[in-house]
Image (tube, helix red, strand yellow):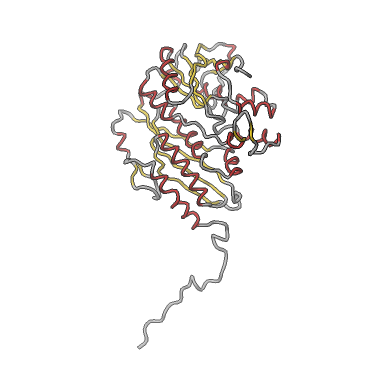
Amino acid sequence: MSGPALQEDPVQDEPAGTTYAAAGVDVEAGDRAVELMKASVARTHGPEVVGGFGGFAGLFDASALRGYRRPLLATSTDGVGTKVAIAQALDRHDTIGADLVGMVVDDIVVCGATPLFMTDYIACGRVVPERTAALVAGIARACAEAGAALVGGETAEHPGLLGPDEYDVAGAVTGVVEADELLGAERVREGDVLVALASSGLHSNGYSLVRRVVSDAGWSLDRHVDDFGRTLGEELLEPTRIYARPVLELLAAVEGVRALTHVTGGGLAANLARCLPAGLTGVVQRGTWTPGAVFATVRDLGRVPSADLERTLNLGVGMVAVVAPDAVDAVVRHFAARGVPAWECGQVRERRESDGRSNAKGVDGGVALLEGRHQGW
């Protein structure tokens, strides 16, 4: 007696056709990239991270917030702009992660929020496992520095939309602040003092201008620049300074911090005005510092007008703290002890008619003015 007839496998009998791999998506490469990044991601996890790495959603135990009287969640999302073009040209991908983390973490720290967790997104034309792992390892190192857990992310392959060696990165962070400890414009008073925190260089803004200047001048990224003490490419890839931990330590140790601003796109004035209330003006004295060599190089090489330079680049100031007059010395000492140069750069006064309308970026805030000339400029 014969048994049941064997059924043919319809999948095996299908004629050859277009596959996902033929369309340019390498699923196996994506899987290898995940394996390579697991260890670096896991190092950012504390006991609050539930379920580890690789789930559909990153899980964070919110019971850690039960000690708050009225916890406010803070969130920010951003990318690193065209700085990725420099990393791609140099085939160096381990520093962009610090830029990404700095852009989002320091946006929430300015309101006094402690970073809790972060997610990232990498879009690329072709998954190169080692490159993707280097990107994520850089993000993870910076998350650890900022005290945030990297709980998840996505790597998407977009052939035909991006070139094989092109990619872009973005991320989002969530943090928490006690409602009655929220920093902001409403705390700022006439007579408060502005304290500048030095940037590490260009950070992650204005690279479209910088790249155009360099290209028009015919400078190669491997060109050694004496004023930098290294190559142009190395200078342009200098990672964004991450202020989160020293700022949070400041808030825990020193009273009198009213507000903070993160100097990103729009430059110093437009971002400072965001943390000032209507009716007050923050006056920054340019003569209190000398912008670094990279800013002078961009200015001179491209003959960039001063006004355009100031509304595009940070010019050496990555963050500004607005503090009570009697807190200035303690604030400066605090950052100096943590390797962040800081100095008094101006003051808050009542707005005058001649100051004009608010120049705050995206909000109806106060006015910020820059006076005088930079030292050595």
In the rendered image, which quarter is residue 213 located in? Answer: top right
Position of 294 with respect to 365 (left or right) is right
* Residue 315 position within the rendered picture, expressed as x and y whole percent measured from the top left: 58, 25
Q: Quadrant of the C terminus?
A: top right
**59 sits left or right of 95 in the view:** left
* Residue 49, image x, y percentages: 34, 42
Q: Is residue 106 above or below residue 367?
A: below
Which residue appears farthest toward the bottom when viewing the image? 1
Is residue 276 visible to us here?
no
Q: Is residue 352 above or below residue 41?
A: above
Quadrant occupied by the N terminus: bottom left
Image quadrant where residue 292 sits = top right
**Residue 117 in view:** yes
Residue 224 versus residue 16 in the image, above or below: above
Image position, residue 189 (x, y; %) = 45, 14
Using the image, determine if residue 16 lies above or below residue 246.
Answer: below
Foreground residue among 348 and 166: 166
Which residue lies at the image location 59% right of the left edge and 35% below the top edge? Answer: 236
Residue at x 41% of width, y 15% of height: 327
For the image, the number of numbered tags is 0
* Front residue of this view, candidates 196 and 91: 91
Q: Indicate the position of residue 334 as horizontal and vertical percent values.
A: 41, 21
Foreground pick, 343 / 78: 343
Q: Identify the residue at horizontal 46%, vertical 14% (top origin).
A: 192
Query: Of residues 280 and 252, which is closer to you in this image?
Result: 252
